Amino acid sequence: MIDGLIGGKLYGKATERVGASGKAFVVAKVRAVVGDGDTVFISVIVFDDKAKAALVALDDGDSVALAGTLTPKVWTDRSGDAKPALDMVAHAVLSAYHVKRKRQAMQGGEASKPTANGANRSAYGGDFRDMQDDL
């Protein structure tokens, strides 16, 4: 197995299903651009409750990063050309929505509160406006 991190755009809407055992899971497709400009489709399945909720909350075309185990595959298109693909069992999902929420939590959290001498413990001094160029 290959443990990997992929980033791309959600292709269609993620859907929740229930297996024969009665256990719920979410399936989705992600389209990622590779170095030469071609795209690779990743078929994703998620069992973790937090990751399932995060994936279902996204819409078609939303950017997403997924961590999990990868299995390389090959499929043949209508003209008979072999194309690469990946299957992923994801255990973590991160999107722009999560980044914003984590940033807000850090602003209001202990790390952004001034100390007794007025210094701020946050790497950005508690003011995240400087981070706009980092995005």
Image (spheres, helix red, strand yellow):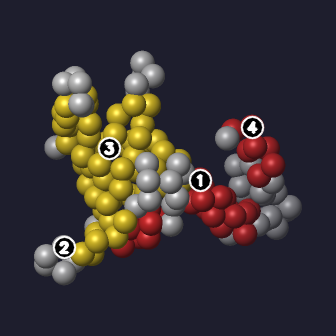
Q: Are the residues at dot 3 and dot 1 in contact (C-beta closer than 8 Å)? A: no
Q: Residues within 10 Å of mark 2 (few under 14, many from 20)?
A: few
Q: What amino acid is found at the position of numbered circle 2 in the picture?
A: Gly
Which residue is at a point 42% across and 37% down the rendered structure image?
A: 32
Q: Position of residue 87 (x, y in %)?
A: 24, 46
N-term-proximal mark, 4 vs 1:
1
Please report the residue visible at 44 percent of the width from the left and 53 percent of the height from the top. 12
User: How many C-alpha atoms fall within 10 Å of the one at disc 3: few (<14), some, or many (≥20)?
Assistant: many
Under circle 1, the secondary element is: helix
First in residue order: circle 1 vs circle 2: 2
| Apparent side of residue 125 relative to residue 5 in the rendered image (left or right) | right
Residues 105 and 117: in front is 105
Q: Give the mark, 2 or 4, whose residue is nearer the N terminus.
A: 2
In the displayed structure image, the side of residue 118 where residue 131 appears, left or right = left
- The residue that label 1 is drawn on is 96
Per the image, the residue denoted by label 3 is 42
